[in-house]
Image (tube, rainbow, N blue to C red):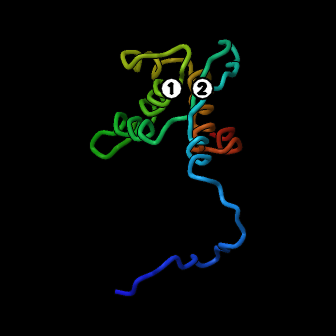
Amino acid sequence: MEKMENQPLKGIDRESGPFVSEDAFLSKLKIGYESFEVPGLGNVQVKPLALDERNKALEASTQNGKTDSAKFTAMIIILGMVSPKIGLSRIPELVAGHPKIVDTISKKILEISGLANPEQVKNV
């Protein structure tokens, strides 16, 4: 097996630095909150979903290999809405709730989580 010692990746110019430090990189990973107004409801506070939360939402809404999109949307809100905080016992109410309000909140959470860009969210 050939040993590779600090060889640059193809297409990467190692001389173009300076590169961000590890501490600077990790400090940008901290998740903050964002407030926004939901028409017909008022202000809510949301946060981006961490990777483990994305997995939880998918696992909780998938059964026998099929994902229940309504339950997935409810899980996105439960995990991503900070205020008011909604508990797991409220999934049935979220699933049966007003779609415009539920979709507005879940789309915002997906957008700030980097799972959709604003143009994609508008068309869902």
Position in image of residue 95 (x %, y %): 45, 23
Residue situated furthest bottom in the rendering: 2
SS for dot 2: helix
Q: Which residue matches tag 2?
A: 105
User: Is the residue under label 1 in contact with that under label 2 (CB below 8 Å)?
Assistant: yes
- Numbered label attached to residue 77: 1
Up the image or down, 78 lies above or below 72; here it is above
Give the amino acid type for the residue marked by disc 1 in the picture.
Answer: Ile
* Residue 118 spot, x, y in % from top left: 70, 41
Q: Residue at x 46, y 16 (%)?
A: 86
The answer to whether 74 is drawn above or below residue 90 in the figure is below
Residue occupying image coordinates x 39% and y 87% = 2
Quarter-of-image position of residue 111: top right
Q: Please indicate whether residue 24 sits to the left or right of residue 71 in the image.
A: right
* Crowd tier of the residue under label 2, counting other residues whose Cα lies within 10 Å: few below 14, some 14–19, many 20 or above: many
Instruction: Place residue 91 in its image quadrant.
Output: top left
Say which label, 2 or 1, has the lower sequence index: 1
